Image: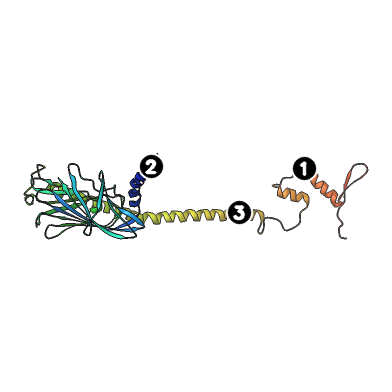
Amino acid sequence: MLKNVMVAFIFMFVLWVPTQVLAVDYTINDLQIDAYLQDDGKVLVEETHTYSFKGEFGGIIRELVPKSGASIVDLEAMEGNSPLIIEADGYEYRIHRAGADETITVVLTYEIHNGVEVYNDMVQFYWPFFDRRNESTYENLIITVFPPETTTNVVAVGYDEAYQKETILGDGQVVFDYGKVPSNRNGDIRVAYDAALFTGGSITHEGEIGPEILAAQQNMEERAAARIERQETLSSIGTVVLPLVALIFLFIVLRVWLEARNKQRALKREVGEGTLLPELKLSMPATICYTNGHHLTAESIAASLLDLVRKGQVKKNCRKSVSISEPNRPP
């Protein structure tokens, strides 16, 4: 029984370790993706990943999700001349390479079947090498598409993070220089070549794709121009609205300050300049009256009489009458 428990524990530990080791602190310094279009419609891809790890790690994870109708086959991973073990889980591939505090470069190679779409006029390679499901930031990403042979008839469009990042070289290569790409972003690429270059492939879509790509490119340019125009309009409105809001705010502050000052002056005129309390000594009735809102109650009068008795200015006679003695006056 104990032996079976130990075996189960060891088995669970082995399954648990790779996931935890792969989840470490890392930076993807560079990612270079080269896609070589073949004349039969296949695409050979080579990805060069450069990772910098802090602490212990167990390898890297690459998620490759093909488009509908396409498939990824023959995936291999190398570090230098050393092959690395790959563990596939659906579209997620775990490349095992243990270490600690290192910068490593791993090269992935694979084929994409049915990755291009063959039309009567052109063949397009429209592919998402990453999308919003990507949880990593690429510090420097470059994707290069190579035609089957040298050509000048090329159309290229980049979407989202790839917009206006394309450069068409003289031999027909298209370079998408993304720079830094944050996580959870899309960045599809779309490249089309003359159909005559793909002699080994058959037509998969009837019709022409060239006008559609050009229309999509024009639509993106118009949307970008409209976005820039909106930004300029908002900026011009801001240059007028912000000073106006500031003036209104200053007007309100000044008005509140003037009202407070006028109230203070009116109060001073009512009670006189200086402190609110009189400087002279007051009698008990006057003090009670002053501190009670200039209102003298019956209880206040009784308290005032008791105070006069205490001072000797009010005396009782045997007939239970009171007499008020005036203070001595100077002759």
Q: CA distance from mark 2 to mark 1?
A: 97 Å
Q: Is residue 330 left or right of residue 50?
A: right
Residue found at x 45% / y 54%:
249
- Vertical order, 49 against 67 (above or below): below
CB contact under 8 Å: marks 3 and 2: no
Closer to the N terminus: mark 3 or mark 2? Answer: 2
User: For numbered disc 3, what is the local secondary structure?
Assistant: helix
Residue farthest along the right direction in this orientation:
318
- Vertical order, 174 against 119 (above or below): below
Label at residue 52:
none
User: For numbered disc 2, what is the local secondary structure?
Assistant: helix
CB contact under 8 Å: marks 3 and 1: no
For mark 1, what is the residue? Answer: 299
Quarter holding the C terminus is bottom right
User: For numbered disc 1, what is the local secondary structure?
Assistant: helix
Q: CA distance from mark 3 to mark 2?
A: 96 Å
- Vertical order, 146 against 306 (above or below): below
Q: Is residue 176 left or right of residue 12?
A: left
What's the residue type where badge 3 is placed?
Answer: Ala
Label at residue 266:
3
What's the residue type where badge 1 is placed?
Answer: Glu
Residue farthest along the top direction in this orientation:
1
Q: Residues within 10 Å of mark 1 (few under 14, many from 20)?
A: few
Residue found at x 37% / y 54%:
241
Q: CA distance from mark 3 to mark 1?
A: 33 Å
> Which one is nearer the viewer's eye here, 223 or 129?
129
Closer to the N terminus: mark 3 or mark 1? Answer: 3
Q: Quadrant of residue 6?
A: top left
For mark 2, what is the residue? Answer: 3
